[in-house]
Image (cartoon, helix red, strand yellow):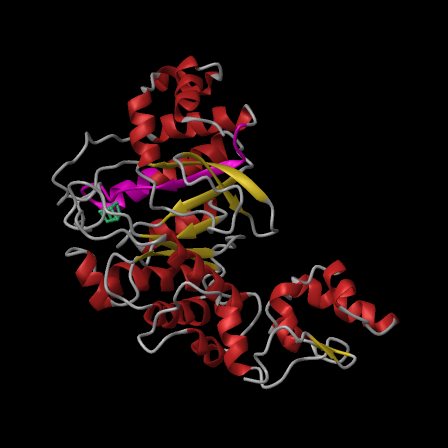
Amino acid sequence: MVTLEKIAHLASDCRFDSLGPDAQMDSEKLSMLGGGTRHDVCASTFSPRSPGLPGICHSFTQDGRCVSLFKTLYTNYCSHQCNYCTNAANCSQKTRAFTYTPQELAGITLSLYQGNYIEGLFLSSGSGRNEDVVMEKIVETARLLREKHAFAGYIHLKVLPGASRSHIQEAMELADRVSINLEASSPAHMNEMSATKNYETDIIQRQRYIRDLMSKTDRKASLPAGQTTQLVVGAGAESDMEIFKRILYEYREIGVKRAYYSAFSPQRGTPFESRAPQQKWREHRLYQMDWLYRIYHFQPQEIHHAFDENGFLGNADPKMAIARQSMDSPADPNVASYSELLRIPGIGPRSAQRIIALRKMHPIKGKTELAQMGVRIKRAAPFLKINGWRDSTLLMWSA
Ligand code: SF4
């Protein structure tokens, strides 16, 4: 892991002359602008290489490659009043405001890239006094990298709430991925979290711009890694079911590639500082639910089985909860379809494909063979029946 100190050293050392006379970089600025991205997620909690620390983060490209990114804010100054954010105008313990110049930021990124420390840039920002002025600087940074320095690395740019369509288009022409944070699942929950952001016009409308600019009719920007979004979980009173409904809209109507979930943690000086932190497991269960919809192609009505009567997932594997409620009888891996196999806990897409390939050659005889194909037998056994065999130690089917 490359630390902020190391990044500061590289920048001030200026062994890459591209930084030019603006190279004097203090580590406080790097630290504040790097640390200011703590709520911006670029990989899910499933990612083994996501340390959750400022500086360098890891993300996955459209072709599934894990890449190291320099993750920073452009500025930590923001005129919005989001009740959970230390950059917000209503935070009583505001730190000094720092801002890069496009030249500085392009230079540091280039330095780290040429030194093989990173493969790209993840650039977020406060909105400054005017989101369009900051968007212009964000775009200028990306333009310097792409056009002046022929930077071939990965670029993820955050679109600021309320940014103009023309700035969004420019960002999309230069980036691999753009995203705008939803933060909340509805206008009412957004009002609880921020007095200044309009959910519909500042966020959803901007997501529609991105969708339309990528559409077959407009084709204004190819944006290879698409648009993503992110929610803060547990800052407001919204249920997991409300989040799920919003996410369905995001995948189906907006066409987001991925949704990310970030468990709320209270920060000193913010209006929400005395609220309880959200346990990490909730974030994890939301990712599992998301995975069932996006990768396993579970129907929304099947996923509903995972929620309790108050609309929460609880700290249990949602796939197991769904299987318990919706599987009428154990499945035989020798005859079950791909989609039926995927619904068995402990069987994922890869093991389901292996099962189907193997049984074309000969019938599957038992647990050992399944385990060799990557099936997690302990989880799968109560839901399986193989050549008349069933796991007699688990009584769920006779209950
Ligand atoms: S828009 Fe809200 S969450 Fe984003 S930096 Fe500004 S105050 Fe923080």
What's the residue at 38%, 59% (across, down)? Answer: 282
**Residue 74, horizontal then vertical, whole percent:** 32, 36
**Residue 42, horizontal then vertical, whole percent:** 44, 47
Quadrant housing the C terminus = bottom right
What's the residue at 63%, 64% (across, down)? Answer: 378
Nearer the observer, 252 or 18: 252
**Residue 13, horizontal then vertical, whole percent:** 43, 13
- Residue 58 at least partly seen: yes
Left or right: 128 as drawn, with respect to 154: left
What's the residue at 47%, 48% (across, down)? Answer: 43
Left or right: 272 as drawn, with respect to 343: left
Nearer the observer, 111 or 325: 325
- Residues shaded magenta: 117-137
Question: Is 175 located above or below residue 299 in the figure?
Answer: above
Left or right: 346 as drawn, with respect to 286: right
Magenta stretch: residue 251 in it?
no
**Residue 210, horizontal then vertical, whole percent:** 40, 59
Left or right: 370 as drawn, with respect to 35: right
Question: Is 76 located above or below residue 315 in the figure?
Answer: above
Nearer the observer, 338 or 127: 338
View extreme (right): residue: 361
Nearer the observer, 350 or 74: 350
Count numbered badges in the picture: 0
View extreme (front): residue: 393
Magenta stretch: residue 132 in it?
yes
Residue 207 placement: quadrant:
bottom left
Residue 251 placement: quadrant:
bottom left
Question: Is 271 located above or below residue 365 in the figure?
Answer: above
- Residue 348 at least partly seen: no
